[in-house]
Image: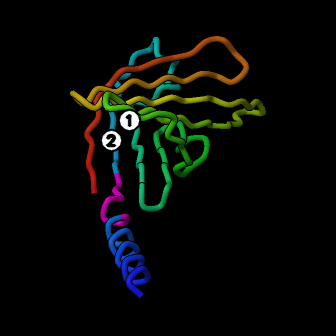
C-alpha cells in the first residue's frame, strides 16, 4: 500500500513539473542585407519558434514565404551553454528549375548575436549572414 502511494505521489509530482518546465522560445532575427550574402538566399528577417511542449520547431522567413507560403519544420541540431543551433531544408521550384537549400541558424546566448548559413544542395558554395535576435519565452 505504501509503495503504491509513493508511486502515485511521484507520478503526481512529475506530471505537474513536466509541463511547467516546458517552454516556447521565439527568435525574431534581423540580418542586414548585403549583396554578397547570395542575392537574397539569406533573408533579412527570420522567425523561429521552438515549442518544447509540442516538441515542434518551426521557421518562417521571406524566402520560405516565396517558395512555400507557410512556416516549415526545423530541427535542433545542438544546444550548449553558449549557443543553440537549428537546421532545416527548403525545397523549391522556380521557372521550371528546382533545388534545395540547407540552412543552419545559430543563436549565441550571450549578446543576442546570430549567424545563418545557406548551402545549395549538390554544390560547394554557401552564403552566410550575421545579425541579431530578439528572444521571447513563454
Horizontal and vertical percent for residue 55?
Answer: 49, 56
Residue 76, compared with residue 10, is above or below; it is above
Report the magenta residues as a range: 18-24
Residue 85, compared with residue 50, is above or below; it is above
Q: Which mark is residue 28?
A: 2
Q: Residue at x 41, y 49 (%)?
A: 49
Which residue is situated farthest in the bottom direction here? 1
Q: Residue at x 33, y 72 (%)?
A: 13
**Closer-to-camera residue (15/42):** 15
Q: Residue at x 32, y 32 (%)?
A: 81
> Is residue 22 part of the magenta span, yes or no?
yes
**Closer-to-camera residue (26/29):** 26
Q: Nearer the viewer, mark 1 or mark 2?
A: 2
Which residue is situated farthest in the left direction here? 111
Give the quarter of the image for residue 45.
top left
Horizontal and vertical percent for residue 51?
Answer: 42, 55
Say which element carries label 2. Answer: strand
> Is residue 116 part of the magenta span, yes or no?
no
Which residue is labeled 1 in the image?
A: 45
Horizontal and vertical percent for residue 126?
Answer: 57, 15
Kindly check if marks 1 and 2 are in contact, taking CB atoms under 8 A apart as contact. Answer: yes
Say which element carries label 1. Answer: strand
Quadrant of the rendering where the N terminus is positioned: bottom left
Amino acid at each position: 500500500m505504501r509503495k503504491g502511494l509513493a508511486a502515485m505521489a511521484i507520478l503526481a509530482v512529475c506530471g505537474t513539473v513536466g509541463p511547467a518546465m516546458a517552454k516556447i522560445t521565439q527568435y525574431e532575427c534581423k540580418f542586414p542585407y548585403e549583396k554578397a550574402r547570395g542575392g537574397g538566399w539569406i533573408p533579412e528577417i527570420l522567425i523561429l519558434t521552438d515549442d518544447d511542449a509540442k516538441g515542434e520547431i518551426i521557421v518562417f522567413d521571406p524566402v520560405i514565404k516565396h517558395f512555400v507560403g507557410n512556416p516549415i519544420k526545423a530541427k535542433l541540431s545542438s544546444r550548449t551553454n553558449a549557443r543553440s543551433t537549428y537546421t532545416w531544408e527548403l525545397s523549391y521550384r522556380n521557372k521550371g528549375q528546382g533545388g534545395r537549400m540547407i540552412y543552419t541558424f545559430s543563436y549565441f546566448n550571450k549578446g543576442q548575436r546570430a549567424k545563418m548559413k545557406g548551402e545549395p544542395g549538390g554544390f560547394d558554395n554557401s552564403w552566410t549572414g550575421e545579425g541579431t535576435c530578439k528572444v521571447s519565452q513563454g
